[in-house]
Image (cartoon, rainbow, N blue to C red):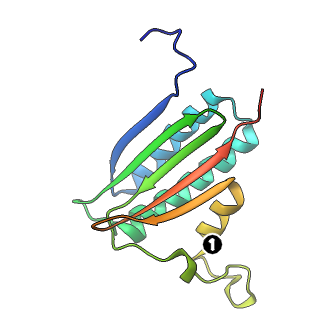
Amino acid sequence: MGKHSQEKSQGVDQFLNSTLDSVDDAETLALNLARDAGFAEEDLHRIGMAVRESMVNAVVHGNRFNAEKKVHVSIARNGTRFVIRIADQGEGFDPDSLPDPLSEENLLRQSGRGIFLIRAFMDEFKVRRLQPGGTEVTLIKYLAAK
């Protein structure tokens, strides 16, 4: 594999520790690949925020900082789709049970805002339960056709 294999999808597949340092690491990985993929500064900012929010959810709410649990991060460019998957090994949660951050009683609450932001910043957002445990989120941002 030489430098000429640019058309092949560039990607990352790593298991990170359940620490806040991993939040920074995942954001850096995602931003480097997104930059290489040709995203503009505004989209890079959105992707970074979405990855941070997803990682915080995985580390804090999913794995609860458990040193024996990892966060699986995979990032790939798939044609015009930039796909980020973040999976924890926690008990899982139901995204539909989250409070609406825009309803009046929740406007000042911090919790539940992350998923709302991720949905706003990305083109697609999916959540699925993993077996035997854990939650995987998939974040997709479309590249503008050249």
Residue 46 at what x, y percent from top left? Answer: 68, 50
**Quadrant including the N terminus:** top left
Count neighbours of disc 1 (C-alpha within 10 A) and say few if under 14, some if 14 to 19, many if 20 or more. Answer: some
Residue with the most extreme bottom position = 105
**Quadrant including the C terminus:** top right
Toward the viewer: 39 or 7? 7
Q: Which residue is mark 1?
A: 113
Assign a secondary structure to mark 1.
Answer: helix
Residue 113 at what x, y percent from top left? Answer: 62, 72
133 in relation to 24, above or below: below
Residue 53 at what x, y percent from top left? Answer: 55, 60
- Quarter of the image where one finds residue 92: bottom left
- Kind of residue sitting beneath label 1: Arg
Number of labels in the image equals: 1
123 in relation to 105, above or below: above
Left or right: 138, with 134 as reference point: right
**Residue sitting at x 37%, y 50%:** 72
- Quarter of the image where one finds residue 13: top left
Residue 130 at what x, y percent from top left? Answer: 36, 64
- Quarter of the image where one finds residue 14: top left
Left or right: 43, with 26 as reference point: right
**Residue sitting at x 58%, y 76%:** 112
**Residue sitting at x 73%, y 86%:** 103
**Residue sitting at x 31%, y 65%:** 131
